[in-house]
Amino acid sequence: MTDLIKIENLKELIIEIRTQSVLLDSSVADIYGVEVKRINEAVKNNPEKFPEGYVLELDKNE
């Protein structure tokens, strides 16, 4: 049986970067129960499934 994720728990994972509310890839991986590299592979291999602005790449200072 899959655990349901409550909205309240998602709100705790959201952080603000460059005035945007975001979920880190590690948080998305936790939500889906997969490795971080699988989330990044999915984004890389299926760009048409992710709307423009979905991915925000951090610089070294961030």
Image (cartoon, rainbow, N blue to C red):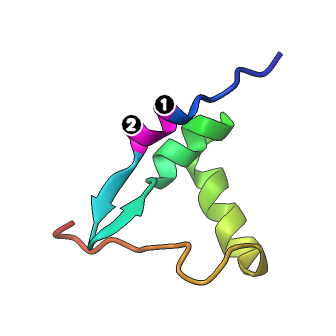
Residue 1: x, y in percent?
Answer: 83, 15
Indicate the amino acid at tag 1. Asn
In magenta stretch: residue 24? no
Q: Residue at x 77, y 73 (%)?
A: 49
Gap between marks 1 and 2 measured at Cα:
5 Å
Residue 37: x, y in percent?
Answer: 59, 53
Q: Is residue 55 above or below residue 42?
A: below
> Extreme front residue here?
8
Contact flag, marks 1 and 2 (Cβ < 8 Å): yes
Q: Main secondary structure of the magenta part?
A: helix
- Relative to 56, 28 lies left or right: right
In magenta stretch: residue 10? yes
| Quadrant of res 20 | bottom left
Question: Depth check: 61 or 7 in front?
Answer: 7
Indicate the amino acid at tag 2. Glu
Question: Depth check: 10 or 29 in front?
Answer: 10
- Relative to 57, 1 lies left or right: right
Q: Residue at x 27, y 75 (%)?
A: 59
Q: Residue at x 71, y 79 (%)?
A: 47
In the picture of the structure, the residue carrying the numbered disc 1 is 9
Label 1: how many Cα within 10 Å (few below 14, some 14–19, many 20+): few
Question: Depth check: 33 or 22 in front?
Answer: 22
In the picture of the structure, the residue carrying the numbered disc 2 is 12
> Extreme top residue here?
1
- Relative to 14, 18 lies left or right: left
Q: Residue at x 67, y 63 (%)?
A: 41
Q: Which residues are magenta?
A: 8-13
Label 2: how many Cα within 10 Å (few below 14, some 14–19, many 20+): few
Which structural element holds mark 1?
A: helix
Residue 11: x, y in percent?
Answer: 43, 41
Residue 34: x, y in percent?
Answer: 66, 39
Disc on res. 21? none
